Image: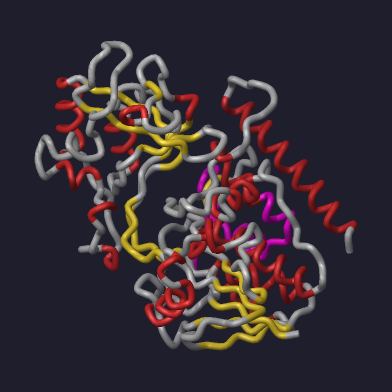
Amino acid sequence: MKVKVIGAGLAGCEAAWQLAERGFEVELCEMKPVKFSPAHKYDGFAELVCSNSLKASRIDSACGLLKEEMRRLGSIVVPAAEKTAVPAGGALAVNRKDFSDEVTRLIRNHPKITVVSGEITEFPEKNAVICTGPLTSDAFAEKIRERFGENGKFMSFFDASAPIVTAESIDRSIAFSQSRYDKGGDDYLNCPFTKEEYERFWNELVNAEPAELHEFDKNPSVYEGCMPVEVLAKRGIESVRYGCMKPVGLTDPRTGRRPWAAVQLRKENAEGTMYNLVGFQTHLKFGEQKRVFSLIPGLENAEFVRYGVMHRNTYICSRTLLDKNFMLKGSENVFFGGQITGVEGYVESAASGIIAGKALADRLSGREPLKLPNTTMLGAIIDYVCDWVDDSYCEFDPMGAIMGILPALDENIRDKREKYAALAKRALDDLDKAIEEHSDGE
């Protein structure tokens, strides 16, 4: 049986490899070298654009754990990266050309994979994995938009994402639970400012150093609702106090009065282990984010599990459109993989391709696809990105591998390194069990 994979980035190569290894004839469609995205320059597959680092190697780190999970799931990318690695301390860094060449060699030499060059402009009707990335071509992006319609909430814009902090690092003696005018539950925490604290914060914010943008990301058309907070702040000292930091409807329990300004934090996951800084989309340098946002009362010792970023990003509302195997709901085996699903990062994109490829192979073989527990890093990412419990709420920021997305341990371990090691051990034990149980069903 022939299947189609669209896009030969990291996710597409992983999906094609999984399917080919299961004996399916794979048509891998890649528009390079006929056409290049604004970011890509090299003819090879799995081209790394933004960095030569695939993040930390330690298993007790989020991305190190994810790479180990990928290895156990039969990844092609992880061994290729290790083969082409260059010294980088505790990170897995590669020679980008050598890495691309190695993945390209493996893909092109596989007897079950046929590479077809050229842009795809029609949406596949069945038995396909779409891995076209955050820079999906305009023609194919329009086909996706047409397929989903207005209710699909297909997203394509310059995305400015807000930082996320761990719940346990928030100072609850300062931050207090309250929805505005007490309308709603306790999903929000509020960090109150005095006038002096606000003016100091505003001054540091407007003078903070922004991150550099790629050439194709410069002069973006940013939606007003996605305006970077530092850009909004430069409109005047009162701009954010009447915007994302408005204190109306809030009462600081320490004073019994309304604060001068306030930053609201919203639960980022159902477990409440992470909080998003509401309205604080930003493209400041990471070090500047840590410095400036730590001036927010209650966040002086905050642990940032993800900093804000700004870049061109095309992704679908996976929370309403995809199931937990990245399959388009109601379709005849049409899957998505990579950053177009809302996963963030090279490794995460590759990992999603593994799941999509495996799931398509399973379905075509008459089997139930592998189900990953959310105690694994990849399972937790899938839980965040796909098949959200509340289909009425679609808007979400892309998510990568972070330890804060994993469910809490049964025991309370205060030392962070020991806690991360315990989380990693649980993840790999649970992954091995899931793989074994899935294999037993063959």
The magenta stretch is 68-97
Instruction: Tell me, yes or no, if residue 24 can be seen here.
Output: yes
Identify the image quadrant of residue 216.
bottom left
Q: Residue at x 12, y 35 (%)?
A: 238
Q: Quadrant of the N terminus?
A: bottom right
Q: Residue furthest top?
A: 255
Nearest the viewer among 64 and 380 is 380
Question: Which coloring applies here?
Answer: secondary structure
Residue 312 placed where, x, y %? 34, 63
Q: Residue at x 60, y 82 (%)?
A: 125
Residue under the image location 29 percent in, 52 percent down: 226
Relative horizontal placement of residue 80, taking residue 366 as reference (left or right): left
Q: Where does residue 412 sit, x and y in percent of width and height?
A: 64, 21
Q: Nearer the viewer, residue 91 or 267?
A: 267
Closer to the camera, 389 or 280?
389
Tell me residue 183's x, y (percent): 37, 32
Q: Quick check: 309 above or below 367? A: above
The verdict on residue 275 being magenta is: no
Please indicate, yes or no, whether residue 87 appears anywhere in the rendered image. no
Quadrant in which the C terminus appears: bottom right
Q: Is residue 227 above or below residue 142?
A: above
Query: How far across and down, in percent of the image, does residue 27 sit?
Result: 64, 84
Q: Is residue 85 magenta?
A: yes
Residue 217 to residue 297: above or below: below
- Total marks in image: 0
Residue depicted at 29% across the width and 46% down the height: 282
Q: Quadrant of residue 298?
A: top left
Q: Quadrant of residue 233?
A: top left
